Image (cartoon, rainbow, N blue to C red):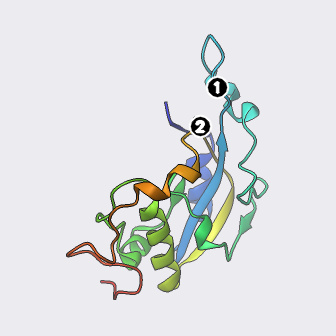
């Protein structure tokens, strides 16, 4: 198990989705599982929202978010906005750089990152961020036939 959508995740995103917005929900990391495993009904009570990310209240929308905080762990956008951004660059190997590229490209193309209250999602613990930079071996700026931040979009 890695990612589990909260019971209101889809409703939370659908309630506020509109063109020009990159929506991000709250993300919470679960503690190690108890011997009998997690109980789905109580996951949100086990894991507070990540302390380094905004956590708006239920029904609240925070506009003008920092694109450097984007995680593809939990996000939503309209098809029109997806096309405007140009999708994810497939030239990255390793972990995480495609998120940074996607959010930077979205911001460059005038897409507003917004934090959505009432769109929760939990995840199991993943490896620490301090290990990740050594795994970024290819970037969109150097990969052939891909676009990097700053290159024209579709």
Q: CA distance from mark 2 to mark 1?
A: 8 Å
- Seen from the viewer's position, the closer of residues 134 and 28 is 134
Residue that mark 2 sits on: 125
Q: Element at badge 2?
A: loop
Asked if one can make out residue 17 in the rendered structure from this viewpoint, the answer is: no
- Residue occupying the far front of the picture: 134
Q: Quadrant of the C terminus?
A: bottom left
Whole-percent x, y for residue 89 in the image: 33, 68
Mark 2, Cα crowd under 10 Å, few <14 / some 14-19 / many 20+, is few
As drawn, the label of residue 20 is: none
Say which of 123 and 85 sits in front.
Answer: 123
Identify the secondary structure beneath mark 1: loop
28 or 111, nearer to the observer:
28
Residue at 52% across, 85% down: 110
- Against 6, residue 19 (above or below) is below
Q: Which quarter of the figure has residue 7?
A: top right
Residue that badge 1 annotates: 32
Residue sticking out furthest to the left: 145
Above or below 148: residue 130: above
Answer with the quarter of the image where residue 124 lies.
top right
Compare residues 18 and 151 and report the one nearer the observer: 151
Q: Earlier in the sequence, mark 2 or mark 1?
A: 1
Q: From this viewpoint, is residue 29 visible?
A: yes
Pointer 2 with pointer 1, Cβ within 8 A: yes
Residue 123 in percent (x, y) is at 58, 39
Query: Residue placed farthest to the right in the image?
Result: 57
Estimate the x, y position of residue 88 in percent, counting from the top left: 36, 66
| Residue 40 percent location from the top left of the image | 61, 25
Q: Residue at x 44, y 56 (%)?
A: 134
């Amino acid at each position: 198990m890695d990612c589990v959508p909260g019971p209101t995740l889809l409703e939370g995103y659908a309630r506020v989705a509109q063109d020009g917005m990159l929506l991000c929900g709250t993300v919470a990391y679960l503690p190690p599982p108890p011997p009998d495993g997690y109980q789905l009904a109580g996951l949100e009570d086990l894991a507070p929202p990540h302390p380094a990310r905004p956590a708006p209240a239920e029904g609240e929308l925070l506009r003008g978010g920092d694109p450097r905080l984007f995680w593809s762990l939990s996000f939503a956008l309209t098809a029109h906005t997806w096309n405007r951004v140009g999708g994810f660059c497939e030239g990255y190997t390793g972990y995480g750089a495609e998120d940074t590229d996607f959010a930077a490209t979205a911001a460059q193309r005038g897409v507003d990152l917004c934090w959505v209250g009432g769109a929760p999602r939990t995840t199991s613990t993943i490896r620490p961020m301090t290990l990740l930079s050594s795994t970024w071996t290819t970037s969109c700026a150097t990969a052939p036939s891909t676009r990097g931040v700053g290159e024209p979009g579709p």
